Image (cartoon, grey):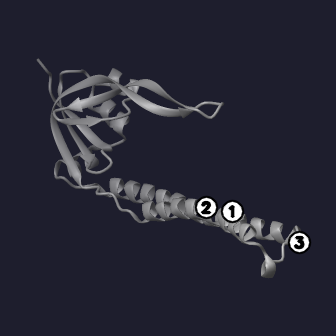
């Protein structure tokens, strides 16, 4: 394993590493993080707008269907009114709640301050459980084995096979990563483990 292999694995250069050692982002890393945040914000805002449009389309569809069926709103029965309110209200509340969550996530800002951990690196196999809907509508749970990179009391998820082949377990590394998202920005091997 060479420093060049680590640089290719985590997409950093000497300038990035020097900035990270000082607990700062390099200009290139700042731009990359800002662009990723802009993209995520656009996606969440777009999702929120689509959800609102779906709620509006549902309301329009229910009302126009009632008009086409000749339902007179001035003399509609209580059951007809309750049916229309329910047909508009329940999907509207659900879609509105999801839209609100999307807008909230679009406005949220993650803490990208640089964190540092030094220690022996180990790859640990973990089992993750994911809910899965079956064709008959019932829920099942699927267990997937994955690897985590653990250094001291910090663990990093989604370890790739490439990472496991480049890094040597038991060696002492320094990892520089973002606080909230735990994205590894750069790394360096300090010493060979014992």
Q: Residue at x 58, y 60 (%)?
A: 95
Under circle 1, the secondary element is helix
Q: How far apart are marks 2 and 1 (CA)?
A: 6 Å
Crowdedness near tag 1: few (<14), some (14–19) or many (≥20) residues, C-alpha within 10 Å: some
- Horizontal side of 186 relative to 67 (left or right) equals left
Is 170 located above or below residue 96 in the figure?
above
Classify residue 128 by image quadrant.
top left
**Residue drawn 56% across the image and 64% down it:** 93
Q: How far apart are marks 2 and 3 (CA)?
A: 23 Å
Whether label 1 touches label 3, CB < 8 Å = no
Position of the N terminus, as image quadrant, is top left
Give percent across and percent down for residue 106: 45, 62
Task: Identify the residue position indicated by label 2 in the image.
Answer: 90
Q: Quadrant of residue 112?
A: bottom left
Rendering coords of residue 123 (x, y %): 28, 24
The residue at 36%/30% (across/down) is 159
Work out whether residue 42 or residue 173 is closer to the camera in this orientation and state it. Answer: 42
Position of residue 164 relative to residue 38, above or below, is above
Q: In this view, does 172 lie to the left or right of 39?
A: left
Disc marking residue 70? 3
What residue occupies the far front of the structure in this picture? 78
Query: Label 1, label 3: how many angstroms apart (C-alpha)?
Result: 17 Å
Q: In this view, does 48 lie to the left or right of 29?
A: right
Q: Name the residue under label 1.
A: 87
**Other-residue count near label 2 (Cα within 10 Å), few / some / many at <14 / 14–19 / ≥20:** few
Tags 2 and 1 touching, CB below 8 Å = yes
The disc placed on residue 111 is: none
The x and y percentages for residue 35 are 44, 58
Q: Which of marks 2 and 3 is in front?
A: 3
* Sequence-first disc among 2 and 3: 3
């Amino acid at each position: 394993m060479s420093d060049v292999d680590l640089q290719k694995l985590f997409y950093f250069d000497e300038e990035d590493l020097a900035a990270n050692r000082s607990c700062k982002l390099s200009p290139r890393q700042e731009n990359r993080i800002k662009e990723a945040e802009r993209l995520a914000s656009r996606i969440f805002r777009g999702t929120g707008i689509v959800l609102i449009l779906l709620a509006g389309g549902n309301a329009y569809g229910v009302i126009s269907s009632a008009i086409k069926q000749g339902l007179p709103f001035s003399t509609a029965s209580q059951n007809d009114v309750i049916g229309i309110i329910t047909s508009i209200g329940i999907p509207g509340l659900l879609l509105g709640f999801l839209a609100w969550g999307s807008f909230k996530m679009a406005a949220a800002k993650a803490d990208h301050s640089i964190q540092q951990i030094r220690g022996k690196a180990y790859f640990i196999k973990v089992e993750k459980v994911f809910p899965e809907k079956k064709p008959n509508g019932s829920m099942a749970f699927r267990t997937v084995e994955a690897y985590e990179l653990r250094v001291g009391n910090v663990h990093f998820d989604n370890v790739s096979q490439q990472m496991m082949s480049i890094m040597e377990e038991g060696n002492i590394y320094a990892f520089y990563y973002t606080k909230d998202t735990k994205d590894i920005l750069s790394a360096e091997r300090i010493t060979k483990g014992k």
